Image (tube, coloured by chain):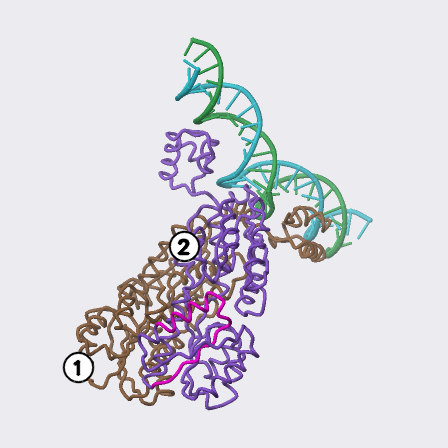
Chain colours: A purple, B brown, C cyan, D green
Amino acid sequence: MRPTVHDVAEAAGVSLATVDRVLNRRAGVRSATVAKVEAAISRLGYVRDMSAANLAKQRIYRLVFIIPDGPNSFMRRLESELEQVKLRSALNRTDITVLKVPAFDGAALARALESIDSKMISGVAVVATESPMVREALARLHRENVHVVTLVSDAPAFKRGDYVGVDNVAAGRTAATLMGRFVGRRPGKIALVAGSMLVRDHVERRMGFEQVIAAEFPNLTCLPVIEGRDDDATAREAVAACLTGEPEIVGIYNMGAGNRGLIDVLSADPAHAELTVIAHELSDHSRRALRDGLFDAVINQDAGHEVRSAVRILQARIDGTAVIDGQESIRIEIYLRDNLP
Amino acid sequence: MRPTVHDVAEAAGVSLATVDRVLNRRAGVRSATVAKVEAAISRLGYVRDMSAANLAKQRIYRLVFIIPDGPNSFMRRLESELEQVKLRSALNRTDITVLKVPAFDGAALARALESIDSKMISGVAVVATESPMVREALARLHRENVHVVTLVSDAPAFKRGDYVGVDNVAAGRTAATLMGRFVGRRPGKIALVAGSMLVRDHVERRMGFEQVIAAEFPNLTCLPVIEGRDDDATAREAVAACLTGEPEIVGIYNMGAGNRGLIDVLSADPAHAELTVIAHELSDHSRRALRDGLFDAVINQDAGHEVRSAVRILQARIDGTAVIDGQESIRIEIYLRDNLP
DNA sequence: CAAAATCTGAGGTACGTAAATCGAAAATAA
DNA sequence: TTATTTTCGATTTACGTACCTCAGATTTTG
């Protein structure tokens, strides 16, 4: 039978109330007594029964997720995964509120952050846009003991929270290595497609990609970035124009949204099957493109994993317990036609 | 505030005891009354408070993990991840026992399975070796309501449990696609290295690999399998002998253990840097080999994920609750030097 | 219709912890 | 020393569910 607080109290020669004060870091216990209790705890191997503790505490983890509105498909996937988590969240005494703010709008994000009542909310997960106002709003939350994790795109200037997401520079490097190795030794040009170069993650992916191409694949050169603006139609036209204008293109790296537009262009002309195409984000469309040979590889980060990880980390921070690093690190996933989940 | 059993009782116009009988599927309630209660439950959106239920139930999930003994590094990684999980398992009212049995020994595994007391144990996770005795032992557990998951290597003949692991045929196909694309169009031979061809997963990886090479990369031919026997020294000598004997080798696929021996051979001669090498299992050694350019890609399955997933699935089966498919599917991970976690 | 079987209600205890009160004891300061 | 603050004990209530008993109500069976 597992030891209980009663056993600890008895073993330490103190009362239940004192054990409780020590366990919950309440004031009014001499350090000598704290040591006695802690000795008893480790001697007995006592671990708090979380079921009972949560029950008694009537604690509800009130979390807020703030994600950008708009067509970006990864954000929409995050949103739908959040819905899944919300369905199960009642079981964990967790209440999740999702706030959507206009994309690329630092002021709107800052307002959303400022609207958070630190009396009510104990954790916030946010897809951060960098701006001084946002930084200050995050700092305020930190001052008022609201735990923060940044999602998807790190906010390096804000050091007080956890980051849940991938290293986008490394993701770009990964795409470049695949591109270089898949293309082989023949010379050629690579077309780069981005959602919008305002977003930090796309900038980082591009940086990593171009670094590796320049350093390791001198036979390849990167063309200027085509901006698809997270929009399929725009991406389609821009890519089509680029392909006709540049006959020497041997590969395409789509580092953002707009996969559907790209797929349209590729499937329009069988000659495009020769191209090596690497894209981001596993969706129904990109899966089909992989299977049909239009795409050669897809780089992905698991939105569901990201959401669940953010929730677990926030809960752990609120409880003051440890996080399992291996479980919470988000992987840069590579999918070929053969290892689709 | 979340509704409780009391609210359900009131809403259904029955007593607490009746609600309890319905919730816990106890006998002695007319079907009309059951319907009334269930209607009230769904009307109020009642969900059982697991913290309270577990506390009251005094339930302990008693799980047994059976894994092969021996030098296989993936099994050792499973074991160490199990230790990690055990440390945290007290928090979840979960008690995990790890049994190690001789590798490749169906009889020993069957004995271990037979030793499981279905009165005490409610879930078993096993790295299955196929044999009639094992199958019968698994069937007995199923008859006696012990939930079973098979780990790492599926046991297709046993359909009553969940499988936690990757599709090894697909893993082999993935390796082959990478190999074919990395090598390019030049002709050559591929050396295949396996731990021991007795193990099902290696057989499957080889099958997938050879399928894809034969179908899609006619410039490549696969040499007969070199058996490394899960042993670094054996692998080293066998690979070295093969490389000197076959000058036309352009790639090596190591589908099992023995990475250290392979790395030794590769680092011995700078000329081997030309080889395209794809291996399984991310370890300290294979990471370094990736970074040093000795390996070109590593296929991996996450041992920690696998263990945690097995535990969650067993708990869900015992509780009769749902599992989150996306969370429990084990991915065929591809690592290049750029996306190492 | 009566007896038997089945169903339901009321109420209790238990699980392990949190959190509170209030007075007693001990330590520290004056 | 006395006064004051700090530390500690004893006890109680509450959280939501599980599980038990026993009596009373209802239905089914003979």
Above or below, A336 against B123 in this view is below
Q: Is residue A206 magenta?
A: yes
- Where, quadrant-wise, is the C terminus of chain B in this rendering? bottom left
Report the residue at 37% width, 33% height from top: A35
Pointers 2 and 1 within a single chain? no
* Picture layout, residue B8 above or below residue B187: above
> Magenta segment range?
A187-211
Mark 2: amino acid: Ile
Q: Which residue is mark 2?
A: A324
Residue A71's spot in the image, x, y percent?
58, 70
Residue B204 in sight in this render: no
Q: Nearer the viewer, residue A196 or B304?
A: A196
Q: In the rendered structure, are the residues bearing label 2 and label 1 in contact, judged by CB atoms less than 8 Å apart?
A: no
Q: x%, y% of residue B130?
A: 37, 71
Residue A123 magenta-highlighted = no
> Is B193 placed left or right of B150 in the picture?
left
Q: Secondary structure at mark 1?
A: helix
Q: From this viewpoint, is residue B181 visible? A: yes
Residue pictured at 71% horizontal, 47% vertical: B10
Circle 2 Cα neighbour tier, 10 Å, few/some/many (<14 / 14–19 / ≥20): some
In the rendered image of this protein, does residue A203 appear above or below residue B177? above
Q: Which one is nearer the viewer's eye here, A189 or B99?
A: A189
Q: Which mark is residue B244?
A: 1
Mark 1: which amino acid? Thr
Q: In the image shown, does A240 or B306 lie closer to the viewer?
A: A240
The quarter of the picture where residue A97 lies is bottom right
Q: Nearer the viewer, residue A220 or B102?
A: A220
In which chain is the residue bearing label 2?
A
Q: Secondary structure at mark 2?
A: loop
Which chain letter matches label 1? Answer: B
Q: Tell me residue B226's x, y (percent).
A: 24, 78
Q: Position of residue B245 (x, y in %)?
A: 18, 84
